[in-house]
Image (tube, helix red, strand yellow):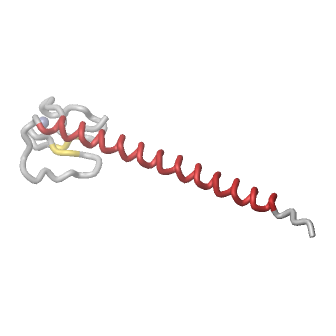
Amino acid sequence: MTTNSGSGLDGMAGFLILVGIATTIFWMVVGWRAMRAHERIAEASEKTAGIPQKPKAIEVEPESLCVSCDKTIPAGAKVCPACGWTKPNWRI
Ligand SMILES: [Zn+2]
């Protein structure tokens, strides 16, 4: 009897190696993205830390309230249209 099942095992091993590499890359990307997101959050909190904010500033979806005059600032605006105050939580 000549057994020639080596090729089958090789195929399985190759497949497992590919899966292992794909899994490694996947988690590297996930970790990298999580790190980047964490950095952005840290930067954002550093930016807002220096500006006096009212307690319990409710983050309204696209719009936000001016910390200076309490008027609504549109999502696209970088400064308050009413008084020119910079939005405290505007994002890049
Ligand atoms: Zn204002």
Residue toward you, 44 or 33: 33
**From the viewer's perspective, is residue 79 above or below residue 17?**
above
Which residue appears at 75% of the width and 56% of the height?
10
Residue 29 location, x and y as percent? Answer: 47, 45
The quadrant the N terminus occupies is bottom right
- State the residue at coordinates (7%, 51%): 55
Query: Is 6 situated above or below 49?
Result: below
Query: In the image, ligand 1 is in what quadrant?
Result: top left
Q: Percent x, y for residue 92?
A: 31, 34
User: Which residue is pictured at 30% across the width and 44% down the height?
Assistant: 38
* Front one among 41 and 34: 34
Q: Residue 28 placed where, x, y %?
A: 47, 46
From the viewer's perspective, tell me whether residue 51 is left or right of residue 21. left
Q: Which residue occupies the foreground of this view, 50 or 89?
A: 50
Asked if residue 81 lies left or right of residue 62, the reply is left
Q: Indicate the position of residue 11 as horizontal and vertical percent values.
A: 75, 57
